[in-house]
Each structure stands twice: as structure tokens, then as C-alpha cells.
Image (cartoon, rainbow, N blue to C red):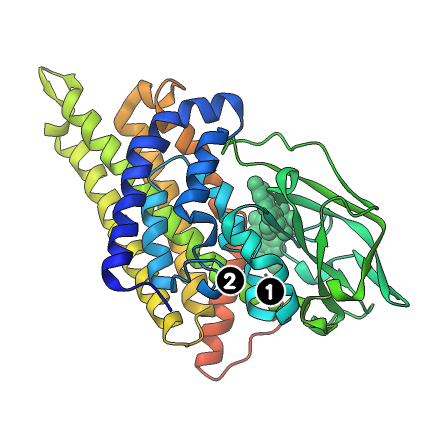
Amino acid sequence: MPLDRDTFDLLLGTVGRFVRERLIPREAEVAEKNAIPADILADMRELGLYGLSIPEALGGLQLNMEEEVRVVFELGQASPAFRSAVGTNVGIGSQAIVLAGTEKQKQEYLPRLASGELVGSFALSEPEAGSDAMAIKTTARRDGEHYLIDGTKRYITNAPISGLFTVMARTDNSRRADSISCFLVEAGTPGLSLGKPDKKMGQAGALTCDVIFDNCRVPTGALLGGQEGNGFRTAMRVLDKGRLHIAALCVGIAERLIGESVRYAAERKQFGQPIANFQLVQAMIADSQTDTIAARAMVLEAARKRDRGENVTLEAACSKLFASEMVGRVADRAVQIFGGAGYMAEYPIERFYRDVRLFRIFEGTSQIQQLVIARETMKLHGFAAAGNSEDK
Ligand SMILES: Cc1cc2nc3c(=O)[nH]c(=O)nc-3n(C[C@H](O)[C@H](O)[C@H](O)COP(=O)(O)OP(=O)(O)OC[C@H]3O[C@@H](n4cnc5c(N)ncnc54)[C@H](O)[C@@H]3O)c2cc1C
């Protein structure tokens, strides 16, 4: 049973308070230590944040998409590394199992992902397969009652702390969607190892690294849904949902940045008055607010459409493209409003400016969203676009 309205409003209020009282005050510490403090992770588990999108019968809160994006608007008010800690369990690290797992796989993993006991990762990208996801080289070869997995996955979020990897691997050599299958591989399986944590531009506290499979033997029961060939399609469905989640995160961050900008503009005096009085500064605030409201409306509309059971490939790509580009503009204006202080690490603006750059790159770059949008739009008008039917 999904949450009733009052319970959901209560949850939203609690998350908002948690963000303001517990997360924002710890942002600098997270950035410095490149880790989320254990007490914060425990609080996040307690609040149910790991299980937002997992069915209630399996221990989650079973939020619909509109509810999930509204929670993410709140979470986005704090440094995105906090969201990343729960983000894979809510999104790409659990949804393949929700969408396509067998009953046994759901029972085995979803309750532990929902509680946060287990962290899930989604391993699709490779050194030579980013935007071109169909180019993956990782293979899974059947060997009796097992599969042997070989290959390297790159930039995998939460891999250093992950207990379960959703891994896309090739079970056939041809370049077709049904050549790719999906496997659930537990950390500690012999033949699975991790690279060194990546050094990133931003989002300190959110971890990524390579995941290496060398003759990694998994039982046939690890094949998602018990069926070969559904991995690529499942990955694309997971990414559709993930794009809305990321777009909502961008909206939340933009709202935070506008709040910071207005506060600073009201306090900072030049020419004998607060810079907020200057219309050229007001124009930047107005542009950021307009951008943010537009993205928020777009995300909510797409989320409601998804909740009605309609296909949102087009709307999810539009939302992700617009919101991730939008938060880049908002962060840039925030630096401008802060002036020299915006360039200094002492203020959170400099950190957010670096943090938000990622949103135009992962879960499909802006260019890939444009290709998806063009393809879907041309389809709507009866044309089939050539050459980009497999875009991430
Ligand atoms: C911090 C971080 C976390 C990540 N987490 C995960 C994760 O958890 N799981 C996972 O599987 N992956 C993850 N990724 C990988 C991410 O999804 C890829 O980096 C992304 O899809 C882009 O792939 P690429 O880096 O290989 O860039 P490329 O695909 O090499 O793209 C380089 C440039 O070429 C452009 N380009 C490529 N193809 C086209 C085209 N056909 N038309 C026009 N332009 C094109 C791109 O838009 C981009 O501008 C993560 C990446 C980062 C940085």
C-alpha cells in the first residue's frame, strides 16, 4: 500500500528538517573527509531513505514517482554527496531487480537494499563503452550451472561500499539489445575486485571506482529474471526513471543556490547599499528562479505521467537535459552574485559549482539526451531517426 497523503506530508516535512538540521551543517566535513559520517548514514537508514522506491511488502516506502521527486527536491537542498549515498539503492542499484527480478531475487535483495544494510551499484559503463552502451565488452559465458564473467566496469557509483552489483554483460557477440544480459553479483565473489577510488572534480563523499571481473563465477540464479537477453532493455528502463530522479535533484540544488544567493545579496553591501538592490543582480536572481520553476514543473509533469503508467522516455530525457543544464546556469550565476567569495572554497557556492557539473555527464550526457529527444519526437511524427536507436 502506498503512503497516504498525511503520512507522505509527514515524511516530506521530516526529510526537509533532516536536511536543514543534520545534513547542511555537516557539508564541509563531508567535503574535507571525502566520506559521509557513519551517524548520518545511520539516520538515513532510520528515515527509510534507502528504500524510497522499493515495494512496501519488501521493506521499502513504495513512493510513486511524483512522491519520489518531491523527496528529492528536499534532499537536493544539501550537498549532493548525501543523496548519492542513498541514490543507487533508490534508483539504478535496485530498480532492475524491482522491474525484472525473479520473486526469489526480489526477496533476497530488496529488503536489504531498502533498509540500507546492503548498498547496490549499477555497472554498465566501461573504458570503451560510455554513451555507446551497446559497445560493452564484458562477457558472461555459460559454464554448466554457472556463468563466468570477464571485463572491466568504469566510474561505478558507490562501488567501493557496494554489497551488490547489477552488472550488464554480453551473452552473445552480435550488436543487438538482446545480446546483453544482466547479472546480480555480490561483493566478495571470487574474481570480482575493485580499482582505486577515483579522484573527482566534485561531489567529494560520493565514491566511484572501477569494478573488475576476472573469471568471476556466479550461479545461473544470478541472471536477472532468469532470462538471457533482457539486460539492455532493463538498463534503459532503469535509466528512464533515474533521469527523472537526477532532474529532481538538479531542481533541489538550484533552489538551495537561489536561497544562498538571495541571502548573500541582501547582506553584501557595495556603493553604500545591499547588492540585492541592483537590478542587474536582480536579473540574475530572476533568471535562476524562472529556470528552476520551469524545471520543477517539467519534472513533476513527467513524474505524474509515469505514475499513470505511460511511457516517459521523451519526457525523462527532456527533464534531465533541461534540469542539468539549468542547474549549471544557476550555479554559474550564484558564483557571479557572490563575486570573489563565490570563487573561494570557504563558501558552499564554489563546491556546488563543481558538484553540479556531473549532472550533464552521467546517466546519459546532454548530447545523448538530445539524441533520445530527437528520436522520440521524430517517432511521434511518424519518422524513424537513423543511427541512434540504442542511445543510453
Ligand atoms: C561521477 C560519475 C559516476 C558515474 N556512475 C556510473 C554508474 O554508477 N554506473 C555506470 O554504469 N556508469 C557510471 N558513470 C559513467 C557515465 O554514465 C558515463 O561517463 C557517461 O555515460 C558518458 O560516457 P563517457 O564518459 O564514456 O563519455 P563518452 O561517451 O566518451 O562521451 C564523450 C563526449 O562525446 C559525446 N558523444 C558521445 N557519443 C555521441 C553521439 N552519438 N553524438 C553526440 N555526442 C556524442 C558525449 O556527449 C560527450 O560529450 C559515472 C560517471 C561519472 C563521471
Q: Amino acid at mark 1?
A: Lys
Is residue 391 visible to us here? no
Question: On the rendered image, what quadrant is the C terminus found in?
Answer: bottom right
- In which quarter of the view is residue 169 placed? bottom right
Q: Is residue 313 above or below residue 24?
A: below
Please indicate, yes or no, whether residue 43 appears anywhere in the rendered image.
yes
Nearest the camera: 128 or 43? 43
Q: Quadrant of the N terminus?
A: bottom left
Quarter location, residue 327 = top left
Q: Secondary structure at mark 1?
A: helix
In three-dimensional space, the C-alpha distance between marks 2 and 1, rounded to whole angstroms, equals 8 Å
Residue at horizontal 47%, vertical 25%?
31
In this rendering, would 183 be left or right of 84?
A: right
Q: Earlier in the sequence, mark 2 or mark 1?
A: 2
Q: Badge 2, how many Cα within 10 Å: few under 14, some, many 20+?
A: some
Q: 297 or 284: which is nearer to us?
A: 297
- The three-letter code of the residue at mark 2 reads Leu
| Residue closest to the far bottom | 382
How many labels, in total?
2
Q: Label 2: state its secondary structure.
A: helix
Residue 108 x %, y %:
63, 60
Ligand 1 within 8 angstroms of badge 2 C-beta: no
- The front one of 285 and 137 is 137
Q: Position of residue 165 (x, y in %)?
A: 67, 52
Say above or below: 287 vs 319: above
Numbered circle sitting on residue 161: none
User: Residue beneath label 1, please?
Assistant: 106
Q: Which residue sits at x=50%, y=49%?
A: 115
Q: Looking at the image, do the residues carrying marks 2 and 1 touch, with CB atoms under 8 Å apart?
A: yes
**Residue at left 52%, top 22%?**
33
Q: Which residue is mark 2?
A: 58
